[in-house]
Amino acid sequence: MAVSLTEEGGFGLHLDRVRPIHWLVVALVVVTGVVHVAMFVTEDWIPLLLAGLGFFGAVALFLLNVNRALLYPVGILYTAAQVVGYLLLPLGPLWVAVLDKTVQVALIVLLAYLFRTEVLFADRTGTREATATE
């Protein structure tokens, strides 16, 4: 069974399918992306820039209707790698790290929730519609 790269409706902006919880996730992703790019400016370390651009790329893929069954677990792993990376190599002021890691943990929790409700539950019921109330 092949996995489709896009959600139903194909590639492109389908903002009518974006719920408030999705906008919250987008906001958290943008915040951590901005933090990483800003940290690149002060620390001059290319992996920070790449991490920030990766977060911005994820927002673009989400808004362009790329399959959420792929985006959610990849987002969880990518964000968790950022948390572990900081623990192994702390850079920048502590308050920035606390802010960023708090945002990232919240992001992981929300992505796991969305994966569970939109992907796993949908697979059991045969529907890809949102099932959770907000």
Image (cartoon, rainbow, N blue to C red):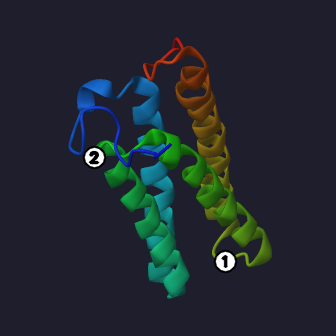
Q: Which mark is residue 64?
A: 2
Q: Above or below — where is 76 with respect to 131?
A: below
Q: How would you rate the neighbour count of disc 2 (Cα within 10 Å): few for under 14, some for 14-19, many for 20 or more?
A: some
15 sits left or right of 58 in the view:
left
Q: Which mark is residue 91?
A: 1
Q: CA distance from mark 1 to mark 2?
A: 33 Å
Q: Above or below — where is 54 with respect to 128?
A: below
Coordinates of residue 93 in the picture (x, y in percent): 65, 71
Q: Quadrant of residue 37?
A: bottom left
Coordinates of residue 75 in the picture (x, y in percent): 55, 52
At 50% from the left edge and 68% from the top edge, which residue is drawn? 36
* Amino acid type, residue under disc 1 in the picture: Leu
Q: Which mark is residue 71?
A: none
At 62% from the left edge and 53% from the top edge, which residue is drawn? 99
Viewer-side residue, 107 vs 100: 107
At 47% from the left edge and 28% from the top edge, which residue is drawn? 21
Q: How would you rate the neighbour count of disc 1 (Cα within 10 Å): few for under 14, some for 14-19, many for 20 or more?
A: some
